[in-house]
């Protein structure tokens, strides 16, 4: 696990590193599995799909970009999003799922790539002072707000946990099928 970035270059490295690791995990998910509601959801006790996870990441990334555009244009920013409060992030996650519900995995992956590229472009254009040496939202610096809302490490962990559970279930099924086959074979031999 990487340390929380404290400067612009650390933020860039953190995003790139965790993004690459997440992509590595996502590339091993078959297209047929991307809509299965089997990953741990963003609300306690809920499940989501890989597509939902990508929608969530795109949604937060686009919010980060929107916040920055508004602040750069001296416009008012409603945090985290118009119509949502910080204690309603589960509802906001559902909004992101709905916003991108018509997109398939490949389209979502392309949008995610574009969003991450835009965030990295944003970081490249601003100074370390803007990211870590001044307050941006309440007590949070811009760098910390971006880091909090581009947590690709958490997404990678969700995918890994899901894949491990799936492997465990497949192994259990194979073991159970093997026992059934041996038992059935011996049973048939005895009675036939």
Image: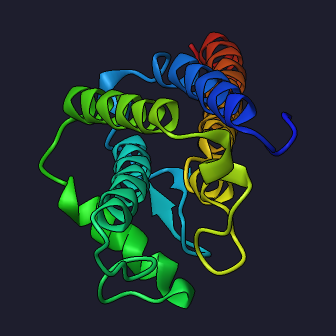
Q: Position of residue 170 (x, y in %)?
A: 61, 27
Q: How is the image coloured?
A: rainbow
In this rendering, position of residue 37 left or right of residue 3: left
Q: Is residue 35 above or below residue 73?
A: above
Q: Position of residue 111 (x, y in %)?
A: 26, 35
Q: In the picture, which quadrant includes the C terminus?
A: top right
| Residue 176 appears anywhere in the view | no
Q: Nearer the viewer, residue 69 or 73?
A: 73
Q: Is residue 146 above or below residue 54?
A: below
Q: Is residue 164 left or right of residue 84?
A: right
Q: Residue at x 54, y 66 (%)?
A: 42
Residue drawn where x is 24% and y is 26% of the image: 106
Pick whichever, 182 or 138, lies toward us. Answer: 138
Residue 27 percent across, percent down from the top left:
46, 17
Estimate the x, y position of residue 133 in percent, counting from the top left: 74, 55
Instruction: Name which quarter of the figure residue 20 lies in.
Output: top right
Count of numbered circles in the view: 0
> Residue at the location (62% across, 18% down)?
181
Can see residue 108?
yes
Residue at the spot x=52%, y=70% of the render?
46
Above or below 55: residue 32: above
State whether residue 108 is above or below residue 47.
above
């Amino acid at each position: 696990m990487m340390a929380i970035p404290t400067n612009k270059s650390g933020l860039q490295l953190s995003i790139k590193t965790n993004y690459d690791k997440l992509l590595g995990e996502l590339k091993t998910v078959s297209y047929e599995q991307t809509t299965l509601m089997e990953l741990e959801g963003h609300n306690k006790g809920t499940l989501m799909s890989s597509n939902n996870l990508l929608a969530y990441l795109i949604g937060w990334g686009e919010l980060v970009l929107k916040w920055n555009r508004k602040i750069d244009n001296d416009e008012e920013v409603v945090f985290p999003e118009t119509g949502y409060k910080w204690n309603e992030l589960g509802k906001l996650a559902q909004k992101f799922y709905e916003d991108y519900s018509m997109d398939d995995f490949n389209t979502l992956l392309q949008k995610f790539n574009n969003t991450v590229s835009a965030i990295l472009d944003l970081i490249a254009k601003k100074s370390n002072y803007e990211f870590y040496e001044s307050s941006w939202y309440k007590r949070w610096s811009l760098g910390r707000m971006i880091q909090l809302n581009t947590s690709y490490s958490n997404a990678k962990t969700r995918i890994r946990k899901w894949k491990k559970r799936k492997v465990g279930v497949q192994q259990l099924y194979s073991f159970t099928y093997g026992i059934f086959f041996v038992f059935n074979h011996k049973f048939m031999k005895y009675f036939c």
